[in-house]
Image (cartoon, coloured by chain):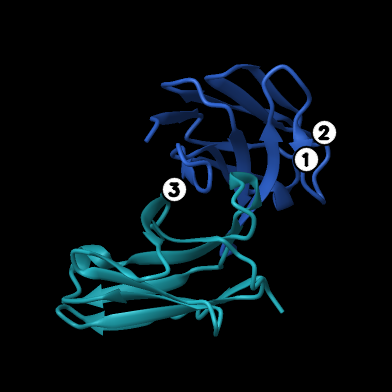
Amino acid sequence: SAVISQKPSRDICQRGTSLTIQCQVDSQVTMMFWYRQQPGQSLTLIATANQGSEATYESGFVIDKFPISRPNLTFSTLTVSNMSPEDSSIYLCSVASAGGNTIYFGEGSWLTVV
Amino acid sequence: RKEVEQDPGPFNVPEGATVAFNCTYSNSASQSFFWYRQDCRKEPKLLMSVYSSGNEDGRFTAQLNRASQYISLLIRDSKLSDSATYLCVVNPTGSARQLTFGSGTQLTVLP
């Protein structure tokens, strides 16, 4: 499986600020995804990061709040904008498996908003 | 009804015990099934796929019952290192974008 690196690994942020999370993959991948896992909850897909075009957002997530970049096939960023305590969560970058029917995750970015 | 449901536990078992988790899914057309393991404050990691005929990987056995729409994970001879949350994951369409995650079952193996 691909090696997926995320940074920052954790951060404590002030309410109203924005944070950009970076995801680097050691090989070119077609599909990259951003997930959120709120405390005690399961994983929710935020969006699919598309290379060369706008990300595809899932219901309940919008570009203004979670802008995503995908400049090439090995890198993506997720920004969490105008943060509130409700945004405290783990944010996970992931890539599709070779077979395309499941995914592998990066180490995650642990975000606490105070 | 949730798309994927798991007993949240916690399951507390002694070392060496056998423990089984079940997971039910609502979409009868679901195509692929997986178990992930998530350690405390870590990312989920793929433990094993679940095949129609059932499959085994060492101490772990996964089974699929399409008629009753559930999958199971059996862990034999539990080790302390098996303590984690086990996530049931269902792919209804075959596309990685459509994965649906259960909330997880927490297992603690006690010495």
Q: Residue at x 78, y 25 (%)?
A: A54
Residue B43: assigned label: 3
Q: Residue at x 50, y 81 (%)?
A: B7
Task: Give the residue pinned by disc 2.
Answer: A63
What's the residue type where badge 2 is placed?
Ile
What's the residue type where badge 3 is placed?
Glu
Q: What's the CA distance linking mark 1 and mark 2?
A: 7 Å
Q: Name the spot of residue B3 as percent of width and height, x first.
A: 66, 70
**How would you rate the neighbour count of disc 1 (Cα within 10 Å): few for under 14, some for 14-19, many for 20 or more?**
some
Residue B42: assigned label: none
**How would you rate the neighbour count of disc 2 (Cα within 10 Å): few for under 14, some for 14-19, many for 20 or more?**
some
Please report contact status of discs 1 and 2: CB closer than 8 Å, yes or no: yes
A4 relative position to A94: left or right: left
* Chain B color in figure: cyan
Q: Nearer the viewer, residue B87 or A82?
A: B87
* Chain A color in figure: blue
Please tell me which of labels 1 and 2 falls first in the chain: 1
Most extreme residue toward the front, as rendered?
B53
Judge if badges 2 and 3 mark residues of a common chain: no
Task: Give the residue pinned by disc 1.
Answer: A57
- Picture quadrant where residue B51 is located: bottom left
Q: Residue at x 47, y 64 (%)?
A: B87
Q: Nearer the viewer, residue A10 or A106?
A: A106
**How would you rate the neighbour count of disc 3 (Cα within 10 Å): few for under 14, some for 14-19, many for 20 or more?**
many
Parent chain of label 1: A
Q: Is residue A15 above or below residue A75?
A: below
Q: Nearer the viewer, residue A49 or A60?
A: A49
Q: Name the spot of residue A90 as percent of width and height, x first.
A: 56, 47
